[in-house]
Image (spheres, grey):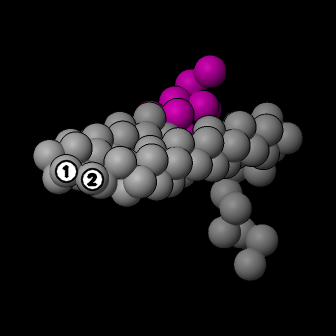
Amino acid sequence: MKRYTAPIVAAIGAGVIIAVFGGFYFMIFKAIPGASCMRLLIAGIVLAALGVLVAVLIQRIKEIKEGEEDDLGKY
C-alpha cells in the first residue's frame, strides 16, 4: 500500500484544487442574474475533470501493480 500513497495523495490534492476552483467560479456565476447556463457549463467541466482525474489515478495504480514505477524510463 505504501507504493500507492504518493499517486493517491497527488490525485486527491489535484481533485481538491479543481473542486475549489470550480466552486469559486460557480459562486461567482451564481451572483450574476441569468447566468444559469454558465453554472451548468462550469459544473460539467469540473465533473468531467474530476472524472478524468479518477480514471488516470486508477490507470496509474494498475501500472504500479504491474511494476512500472517510473513511466519516464520508457522514453
* Image-based side of 20 in relation to 65, left or right: left
Q: CA distance from mark 1 to mark 2?
A: 4 Å
* Image-based side of 30 in relation to 39, left or right: left
Element marked by disc 2: loop
Write down the quadrant of residue 61 in the picture: top right
Q: Residues within 10 Å of mark 1 (few under 14, many from 20)?
A: few
Q: Is residue 12 magenta?
A: no
* Image-based side of 49 in relation to 21, left or right: right
Q: Evaluate whether residue 24 shows in this view.
A: no
Q: Residues within 10 Å of mark 2 (few under 14, many from 20)?
A: few
Query: In what quadrant of the picture does the N terminus appear?
Result: top right
Residue designated by label 2: 34
Residue designated by label 1: 33
Kindly give the residue lying farthest to the top in the view shown: 1
Amino acid on which the number 1 mark rests in the picture: Pro
Give the overall secondary structure of the magenta segment.
Answer: helix
Residue 60 place in picture, x, y as percent? 69, 45
